[in-house]
Image (tube, rainbow, N blue to C red):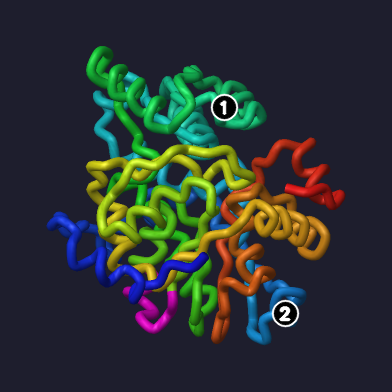
Amino acid sequence: MTVTKPHLAAAEAERPATQPASLVLSDIEAAAARIAGRVVRTPLVASPSLSRLCGHPIHLKLETRQPIGAFKLRGAMNAVLALDGDHSRRGLVTASTGNHGRAVAYAARELGLHATICMSALVPANKVEAIRSLGAEVRIVGRSQDDAQAEVERLVAEHGLAPIQPFDHPDVVAGQGTIGLELVEDMPDLACALIPLSGGGLAAGIAVAVKALRPSARIVGISMERGAAMAAALAAGHPVAMVEEETLADSLGGGIGLSNRVTFALCRDLLDEVVLLSETEIAAGIRHAARDEGEIVEGAGAVGIAALLAGKANPLGPTALIVSGRNIDEAVHRRIVSGAAA
């Protein structure tokens, strides 16, 4: 399934007025300066196999090389560093589908702070244990990201903890947007960026940076067919409630928040297209990453590859895929790479 701006026209006409999102290139440049030396400037590597398939240069932006194995460290580190000292010393708290919680836990450990990570029962056990191993307190609440977020709000109200939003906050979006700065620097002729799409922090941040520096570049958000909240919101013209479902792209699960302040408007205004993938297609992306690229990639990180393999994304020039994370359960990865059905 593909959602394009022409398909959104009717919904756009009926959508309620939304406050314009205030995030500009200078915010992302400030974030890059703030997090320099605390996150990895990840490599952009050519993919000969995907380049042959598409007939255009295809490169992989390997956020799998971050210390936590995912891009989320950029936004979390920027948001934590932007806090005032008194607020952060009370402790950090967040809701997460896994990788953001790991990022907040890592940032807290590096900065000598306490972190509480709230997650639903749908978060894979390997991601939960990785967060605990970083010294964070873990709370498993309900079976959705919304349930976990309710616990965050309770802890903020009762204990004054500092909330680090998983996506819908300007500091988080600006941190993720530093990837866009690196893309344009490393690939000045960038024609298209394929970006995993969940709550929209990654896609929105990269889109702000790339569209400012390379206005002609297309920005394509990619998600799964099972419970893709941002795609549903864009189709409706406003944030909507979604039932969270199990998926190989578990890091893309969760809602965008009915009172979304930042990412919905940015994705609405800056994404050129949204592509949705089946579980079988996502599994094929994971398998290709392992067999042809030599990379262990989780489902969410493999969606750019999967979209190309499925013919659902058709780049017309030099293209970058954001390989957003590697934190997949080992047994699940072995099963998929061996050729088992999704």
| Residue of label 2 | 53
Which one is in front in this view, the residue at disc 2 or the one at disc 1? 2
Classify mark 1: helix, strand or loop.
helix
Can residue 298 be seen in the rendering of this structure? yes
Residue 52 at what x, y percent from top left? 74, 82
> Which stretch did the figure color magenta?
209-218
Image coords of residue 115 (percent x, y): 43, 23
Q: Position of residue 15 (x, y in %)?
A: 19, 59
Q: Which amino acid does label 1 sit on?
A: Ile
Tell me the amino acid under the disc marked 2.
Leu
Q: Residue at x 33, y 59 (%)?
A: 234
Q: Which residue lies furthest to the right in this view?
A: 338
Question: Dot 2, crowdedness within 10 Å: few (<14), some or many (≥20)?
Answer: some
Residue displayed at 79% across by 58% down: 294
Circles 2 and 1: CB atoms closer than 8 Å:
no
Looking at the image, residue 24 lies above or below residue 59: above
